[in-house]
């Protein structure tokens, strides 16, 4: 019949890191593009595309983790972006 589930066993939901890493890459690229003077828009795109390409080439975006870790990675990316440009946070309200 197979293995029976015990009363205390809880299977946590797993998600791929693709979307949380993309949100994290958005926050990091905003931070790093502000360090470049003159060509912030081009630097933003280059950094964002480079980070996404690295995540895809290393198969990091295909890794499945607990949903809590995915949410924490996305929140870290948003926190970096909001700390870099606090005006974006104020537009939410």
Image (cartoon, helix red, strand yellow):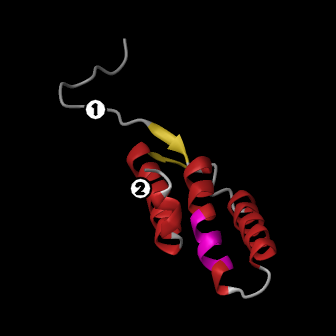
Left or right for 22, reference 14: right
Q: Quadrant of residue 58?
A: bottom right
Question: Which residues fall within the magenta stretch?
Answer: 27-33
Question: What residue is at 21 percent from the left and 25 percent from the top?
Answer: 6
Question: What residue is at 64 percent from the left and 80 percent from the top?
Answer: 34
Q: Residue under circle 2?
A: 72
Q: Residue under circle 1?
A: 10
Q: Tell me where residue 18 appears, x and y as whole percent.
A: 62, 49
Please determine whether, in this image, residue 84 is positioned above or below residue 10: below
On residue 77, which mark appears? none
Instruction: Looking at the picture, tell me which residue is in the foreground, 21 or 78.
Output: 78
Instruction: Looking at the picture, tell me which residue is in the foreground, 59 or 72.
Output: 72
Instruction: Looking at the picture, tell me which residue is in the foreground, 10 or 93.
Output: 93
Q: Residue furthest left?
A: 7
Q: Tell me where residue 54 appears, x and y as whole percent.
A: 72, 66
Q: Tell me where residue 69 appears, x and y as whole percent.
A: 42, 52
């Amino acid at each position: 019949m197979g293995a029976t589930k015990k009363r205390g066993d809880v299977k946590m939901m797993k998600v791929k890191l693709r979307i949380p890493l993309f949100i994290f890459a958005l926050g990091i690229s905003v931070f790093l593009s502000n360090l470049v003077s003159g060509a912030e828009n081009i630097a933003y795109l280059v950094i964002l595309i480079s980070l996404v390409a690295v995540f895809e080439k290393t198969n990091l975006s295909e890794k499945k983790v607990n949903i809590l870790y995915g949410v924490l990675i996305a929140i870290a990316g948003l926190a970096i972006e909001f700390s870099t440009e606090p005006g974006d946070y104020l537009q939410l309200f």
